[in-house]
Image (tube, rainbow, N blue to C red):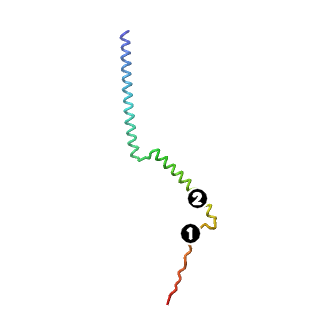
Amino acid sequence: MQTRNRFFDDAAKIAGGAIGTLEGIRREVEVLVRQQVERVLNKFDLVTRDEFEAVKEMAARTRKENEEILKRIKDLEPSKNFRSITKKPPRRKKTNSKKT
């Protein structure tokens, strides 16, 4: 009976050691895979989440400003005092006056 208990004790110790070893291997493989993935992603020249959020915020702010400017332009267009920026002033005719 004593031998049988000792056998199970030894088997439990071996199993515990194997589980600990496997856990260490799992952590090591996880680190290696993470490093490999980071290396591959760095080759793609991707932006970070913070950079993406900053640009997204800038684009939203710019879009809002553009909408406000377009509204102001539409409000000014019917006005009689508004002169289109692209419209050129009338040309003056050249006079050919010769002094003799």
Mark 2 residue type: Leu
The quadrant in which residue 87 appears is bottom right
> Relative to the observer, which residue lies in front, 44 or 76?
76
Q: Does 87 appear above or below 70?
A: below
Q: CA distance from mark 1 to mark 2?
A: 18 Å
- Is disc 1 surrounded by few (<14), some (14 to 19) or many (20+) residues within 10 Å? few
Q: Does 73 appear above or below 56?
A: below
The residue drawn where x is 38% and y is 22% is 16
* First-in-chain label (1 vs 2): 2
Mark 1 residue type: Lys
The residue drawn where x is 60% and y is 59% is 72
Point out residue 5 in the picture as x, y percentages from the top left corner: 38, 12
- Is disc 2 surrounded by few (<14), some (14 to 19) or many (20+) residues within 10 Å? few
The residue drawn where x is 39% and y is 46% is 43
Point out residue 14 in the picture as x, y percentages from the top left corner: 36, 20
Image position of 58 (left or right of 34)? right
The quadrant in which residue 31 appears is top left
Image position of 2 (left or right of 51)? left
Q: Secondary structure beneath disc 1?
A: loop
Q: Secondary structure beneath disc 2?
A: helix
The residue drawn where x is 55% and y is 71% is 88
Point out residue 79 in the picture as x, y percentages from the top left corner: 63, 65
Point out residue 20 in the picture as x, y percentages from the top left corner: 38, 25
> Relative to the observer, which residue lies in front, 90 or 42?
90
How many circles with numbers are drawn on the protein? 2
Checking the image for residue 87, the label placed there is: 1
Q: Does 37 appear above or below 73?
A: above
Q: Which quadrant, please, contains the N terminus? A: top left
Checking the image for residue 70, the label placed there is: 2
Q: In the displayed orientation, state which residue is furthest to the top.
A: 1
Checking the image for residue 2, the label placed there is: none
Q: Check contact, mark 1 vs mark 2: CB within 8 A.
A: no
